[in-house]
Image (tube, grey):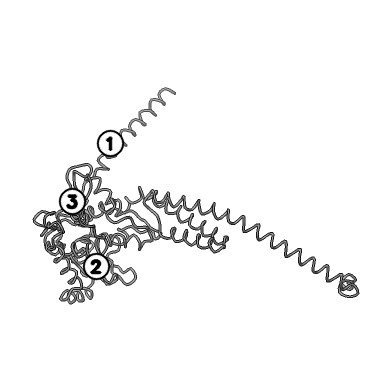
Amino acid sequence: MKMTMRLTGSNRPIARLVLATTLLTTMLQITRASSAQAAASVDEFKAAYAVAEAANTQAGALRNQWTATASTLADAKKAADAGNFDAAVALSKEAEALAKASIFQGTSEKQAWKAQEIR
Amino acid sequence: MKVRSAISLASVALALAALTLAAAPPASAANAIDPAADARAFQKFFTTKFPKLKLEDFVNGPYSLNEDMHRQWVEKEEFPPYEFSLDMGKEMFAQPFKNGKSYADCFANGGIGIRQNYPYFDDKEGKVVTLELALNRCRQANGEAPFSYVKDEMAALTGYMAFTSRGKPFDIKIPNDPRALEAFETGKQYFYTRRGQLNFSCASCHVQNPGERIRAEILAPALGILNAMPIYRSEWGGMGTISRRFITCNVQTRGVPLDPQSDEYRDLEYYLSYVSNGLPISGPGARP
């Protein structure tokens, strides 16, 4: 209570200075944190996108790519171009999951198709 | 005692092994490719599933499975939507190339009444040759640019050639050549393989669910499905070739389609045509 009194009452200029410094420091910390995060996300996006693209290429070798993978990869790139790296990474991971599912399908169907055959 | 037990155990094991070997068919017999048996089973499946339908009626697809649609179709056939394309195809077919030759020079019987023999297995190339492919090869051999496999010109040409074969039964041959048998088998595998994000195979719709609705459409049976090609589709607002049909099917299951006339599509056409042997050509057709 005393402290509050002192900051907001008799020592008003000091209180203002302390408040301004605190705000400035916080703002600087936020700016630094977000720029550090953006830099990390660019790399993270590049890595995630490369992994997804490689998985989709593997599905292509099985002649079993999905249109959803291609469109999700395109969306990831669009998000990265717009500077939204969080979304770009998330979309790249989604594309990777889709590509992996198509690889699984392509591999398992090499035998599984026989179950549907008319005999 | 121990020796006697071991001998008994070994005898039982040997007897079991002998029984297993005798019961299991040889691997080669189980995996033997037998197109004739496949075609018999295929046709039996559909004639059993739709006992009231005559074999030749399967070529009319959904129109043979639904009475209301059948009535609409009969009326539509009085002024069929593919008529303009048919006229265009007839004109194109007769039009000589710049070198003076024509399509008639590339085909047996001048290209008239031969649709039922396509696709065929070319033993020189070791691959299946479809009518669409043969038409483009004919153009290229005579110094003309190939047509798109999915657009109007190709549909018009194949439509006209199908029209000259109307009523003739599919007569697809599979020579006793391991490559031809392999092509048939690859086509069959493609037909039954689930693909795309929706995890559908061709058979999911056209074997397991013909006659049922998928959204507003009634699914056609796989038997006789290519006899009516090319088709005018209201959904497309125009004509479509077999290549277009395969590509659209793949896209509808959210799979990336292959290139038109890729080996797999050629083999698929070979398989589907062969199992419909004996059913009449009815193309060009119309579908909703």
Viewer-nearest of discs 3 and 2? 2
State whether residue B127 is above or below residue B91: above
Which residue type carries mark 1?
Answer: Ala
1 or 2: tag closer to the N-terminus: 1
State the SS at label 2: strand
Q: Name the residue under label 3.
A: B120
Residue B194 picture location, percent across and down: 35, 55
**Is residue B209 or residue B181 the one in the foreground?**
B181
Residue at 43%, 60% (x, y): give it.
Answer: A68
| Quadrant of image for the N terminus of chain B | top left
Whether A110 is drawn above or below B51: the answer is above
Q: Separation of disc 1 and disc 3 at Cα?
A: 39 Å
Evaluate whether label 1 is on the same chain as label 2: yes
**Mark 1 falls on what kind of element?**
helix
Q: Which amino acid does label 2 sit on?
A: Met
Quarter of the image that includes the C terminus of chain B? bottom left
Depth check, mark 1 against mark 2: the one in front is: 2
Q: Name the residue under label 2.
A: B239
Q: Is A46 rendered above or below residue B21? A: below
State the CA–CA distance, disc 1 to disc 2. 55 Å
Chain of the residue displaying label 2: B
Which chain is home to disc 3?
B
Image disc number at residue B160:
none
Please name whichever residue, B88 or B172, is drawn nearer the observer in this view of the structure: B88
Residue count near mark 3 (Cα–Cα under 10 Å), binned few <14, some 14–19, many ≥20 = many
10 Å crowding of disc 1: few (<14), some (14-19), many (20+): few
- Residue B150 locus on image (x, y percent): 27, 62
The amino acid type found where label 3 is placed reads Tyr
Q: Can residue B18 be seen in this view?
A: yes
Q: Name the residue under label 1.
A: B22
